[in-house]
Every structure is written in structure tokens, then in C-alpha cells.
Image: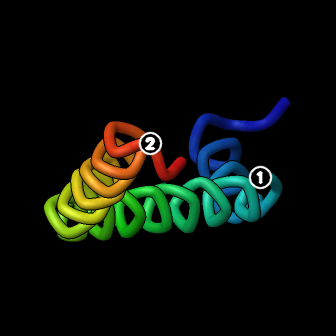
Amino acid sequence: MLSCKKMLVSLWKDEDGLETVEYAIAGGLIAAAVVAAFTHLGEAVNNVINWLYAAVSSSSASGTF
């Protein structure tokens, strides 16, 4: 039977599942970058959407649509 110390050492050296943790960290970093990019670009995108809405509204109101 393994002693407690040997069991802990074997768990410490065991690298199974390490790739999963690395993928989770990479996914978290990518998600954080996407959130930061959309937060930073949110106002610019909102301005473009409002401009498009105004352009479509004015053209449909004048009957040229």
C-alpha cells in the first residue's frame, strides 16, 4: 500500500489532464479579449448602427425605398 507521501508525489508528477487546464486558461484569455474588444468598440458600432437606421428611415420616409 502506498504511503501518503508517495501518493501525493505520484499525484504531483501525474500530468494527465494538464492539457485540459491549458485549454481552459487559453479559452478564458480569448473570452476576456473578445469582451474587451467589444466593450472598446461598442460605441463605434452603436454609432454605425444608428447611422444606418437613420439612413434607412429617411429613405423609406421619402418614398425612395
Residue in view at x 32 percent, y 54 percent: 49
User: Foreground mark, 2 or 1?
Assistant: 2
Q: Position of residue 5 (x, y in %)?
A: 58, 46
Residue 55, percent from left and from top: 32, 57
Tag 1: residue type?
A: Gly
The quarter of the displayed image where residue 31 is located: bottom left
The residue type indicated by label 2 comes to Gly
Q: Nearer the viewer, residue 37 or 61?
A: 61
Assign a secondary structure to mark 1. Answer: loop
Per the model, the C-alpha gap separating discs 2 and 1 is: 63 Å
Q: Is residue 41 above or below residue 39?
A: below
The answer to whether residue 38 is left or right of residue 18 is left
Q: Residue at x 57, y 59 (%)?
A: 27
Image quadrant where one finds the N terminus: top right
Relative depth, front residue between 18 and 15: 18
Q: In the figure, is residue 39 to the left or right of 15?
A: left
Residue located beneath label 2 in the image: 63
Mark 1 neighbour density, 10 Å: few (under 14) some (14–19) many (20 or more)? few
Please give the residue where the numbered disc 1 appears in the rendered image.
17
Asked if labels 1 and 2 touch by Cβ distance under 8 angstroms, the answer is: no
Left or right, 52 with respect to 10, comes to left
Q: Callout 2: helix, strand or loop?
A: loop
Mark number, residue 45:
none
Task: Point out the residue furthest to the front here.
Answer: 63
The percent coordinates of residue 16 (x first, y second) are 82, 55
Identity of the residue drawn at 70% across and 65% down: 13
* Residue for point 20% across, 69% down: 44
Q: Earlier in the sequence, mark 2 or mark 1?
A: 1
Give the class, few, some or many, for how many residues have Cα within 10 Å of label 2's Cα (few <14, many ≥20). Answer: few
Q: Nearer the viewer, residue 32 or 55?
A: 55
Measuring from the top left, give residue 4's x and y in whole percent: 60, 35
